[in-house]
Image (spheres, rainbow, N blue to C red):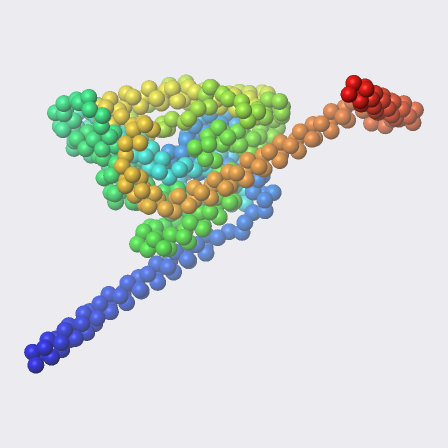
Amino acid sequence: MALGLAARALALLAVASVALLLPLVSAGDEEYRHCEGVVRGWAASSSTGRDKDGDKLSLKDLLFFLHIPRTGGRTYFHCFLKKLYTNAQECPRSYDKLRFDPSHPDCKLVVSHDDYSLTSKFPRERTSVVTILRNPVDRVFSTYEFSVEVAARFLVHANLTSAKLMTTHIWPWKYLVPWMREDLFARRDARIDKLHSSKKVNAYDVEDMVMPLHQYINDPVAHEIIHNGATFQITGLTNNSYFDGAHEVRHCVRQHPDLGHIVLEVAKNRLDQMLYVGLTEDHEESARLFAHMVGGQVLSQSGTLNLDLKEDLPSENDSHPSMVEPEDEETNEHLDSTHGWQNNEALNSTSDEQANGNMTVGKLMEAYETCIAKLRKSQSNRRKISLKKVEEANFSKEARKLVPEAILKQIISLNSLDMELYDHAKKIFTQEHLMLKAQQSMVGQHRQLAEQKGWIDIICNDGICSPWIVAVLGLGITATIALVSFAVTTRRRTSKLKV
């Protein structure tokens, strides 16, 4: 009897539990369906007709350099684009909330951390977009390092209140740097009291000095801004978006990761339509591709291109002293005046070669190499000075090897969309390389034909040869062939006699 009552009680409890859970399941299903509708609706509205290949590869009136943070884009801005475009052609003002008329005829260049949604303010049919992607794991490391570096510069101030007065940050650093700066000031006493140790430490886990990497990547701020940042920036869904519904779409994707593939497909499609996609890791070839695919067209459209193949097409085996592993530093304008770059020679140097009509793609590459060498030297010195107050945070590629495998796997998992997008970018990069080779081959053939035509013009009048010249040329060619045949035959006979 007692067993029967117990069984009934359990049955009633199970029914009650199901009754209580059903509304929750139903609410969960309803929330998922809502999110799916939001994401799919956004994706449908974001779809645009694919450009024809010819249109995609042609530079249009306005160039938008979509700069994903920590990819080396600032180097391209200062060492390429500043040499290709005049100040008057740069739409005011890059790396700021832009207030300008993109239809103005002088407005030719926009370089910004603003995401793809900014293109809603551009004449789409007259705008070309370029960008650079980086391995997502390296980009997360670099974002962490740069957040610490810039925030550490404020430690010269007596207190956090004083430091806050000097803030002039741009996105995403206007969120990341104050967050890190507040953390650094909170650990200030611990840093002062710490006795320096000669023991080798993991630079990414010195908790008494600076926020450890594992804490950084798990913070809600990192989830909002850093993880899958390239995908959200290319789809126009950052927290800096010009699209009002960006927050809801981003929230739905974070709540339901399986909806991420919809956003990823839009990002891949956007990359497919871009004029140029570079890779930070393959920076030397990326720079050459940019110089030819973008720089060559800018010079050609401005009427200043003087193509010299011998100069423009260095051998793949050529090496340049400045074309080495890129440093993880970026120029920035979001610093207090004490540490400004106004007098930096590498950044403010300009070239008047374009204006003089003497610029070639080869000279553009030479100017880039000179500029980047100066830039890296300045940035390296600056980084050392910035990190002195957190000296055990001695960031380097060697130091990264001490980071536990579990954290690396977590970064990969948190950036799964960016990992797939990066793989897609590598495929596009390979295609760009092949297209450039084909283009170079065609240019070479045209040059060869031009040289042949020039030789004919020497002996003919305006390309029209009289019959007797044709006859003489024909006899000369025939005699040459006969002599070569006779020489080959004689050589064979001599060889047989020796045997």
- Residue 242 in the image: above or below residue 401: below
Task: Please give the name of the residue rendered at 42% of the width and 54% of the height, measured from the top-left corner.
Answer: 262
Image side of residue 76 versus residue 54, left or right: left
The image quadrant of residue 398 is top left
Image location (x, y in percent) of residue 489: 83, 23
Q: In the displayed orientation, state which residue is furthest to the right.
A: 468
Viewport quadrant of the C terminus: top right
Image location (x, y in percent) of residue 270: 48, 46
Image side of residue 322 versus residue 455, left or right: left
In this rendered view, identify the residue nearer to me: 235 or 406. Answer: 406
In this rendered view, identify the residue nearer to me: 27 or 109. Answer: 27
Viewport quadrant of the N terminus: bottom left
Image side of residue 271 versus residue 362, left or right: left
Task: Please give the name of the residue rendered at 34% of the width and 43% of the height, measured from the top-left corner.
Answer: 412
Task: Please give the name of the residue rendered at 80% of the width and 22% of the height, measured from the top-left corner.
Answer: 496
Image location (x, y in percent) of residue 43: 43, 54
